[in-house]
Image (cartoon, rainbow, N blue to C red):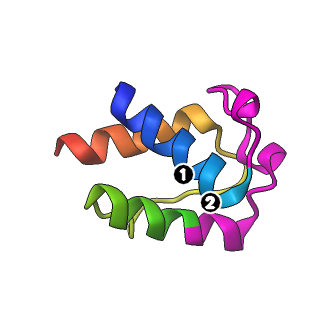
Amino acid sequence: MASATDAVSTLMVQKFGVDPAAVRPEIPLYELRMDSLALEEFRILIEEQLNIDLEDATLTSRNTVGELVELVHTRTLG
């Protein structure tokens, strides 16, 4: 799962200016200032970077970083 974690962390830091120390599994996305518009942009970036489909994924700012990483991880496997 390290690659999914790395991909999510790297995109959050590089594209959204999130402090790398703040990207922890238990942190809700809203605490990283990821609102619905940012999450949609983030979803598209993840799809493009990792060549996966997250179109049907339900993702809100209340999800945690860990939940997002798990979603990305499961989609990269199958």
- Image: magenta residue range: 18-41
Q: Is residue 37 magenta?
A: yes
Residue 58 coordinates in the image, percent (x, y): 51, 59
Image quarter in which the C terminus is found: top left
Q: Is residue 10 above or below residue 47?
A: above
The image position of residue 50, as x and y in percent, is 30, 55
Tag 2: Cα neighbours inside 10 Å, few (<14), some, or many (≥20)? Answer: few
Where does the image place residue 44, in percent across and percent down from the top left? 46, 70
The quadrant the N terminus occupies is top left
Q: Are marks 1 and 2 in contact (CB under 8 Å)?
A: yes
The residue at 57%/57% (across/down) is: 59
Q: Could you tell me which residue is drawn at 83 percent across and 44 percent down?
A: 31
Q: Amino acid at mark 1?
A: Leu
Numbered disc 2: secondary structure: helix
Foreground of the two, 25 or 3? 3
In the picture, measured across the screen, residue 38 lies left or right of residue 41, that is right
Q: Looking at numbered disc 2 in the image, what kind of residue is underneath it?
A: Lys
Give left or right: position of 47 versus 21.
left
Residue denoted by label 1: 11
The picture quadrant where one finds residue 26 is top right
Give the residue at mark 2: 15
Task: Look at the numbered disc 1 and give the secondary structure of its residue.
Answer: helix
User: 23 or 56: which is nearer to us?
Assistant: 23
Q: Is residue 25 left or right of residue 75?
A: right
Residue 36, located in which quarter of the rendered image? bottom right
- Disc number at residue 42? none
Q: Position of residue 20 (x, y in %)?
A: 69, 34
Q: Is residue 40 magenta?
A: yes
Outermost residue on the left side: it is: 78
Task: Give the CA distance from mark 1 to mark 2.
Answer: 5 Å
- Residue drawn at x 56%, y 31% as measured from the top left: 66
Residue in the image at 30% along x and 40% along y = 74
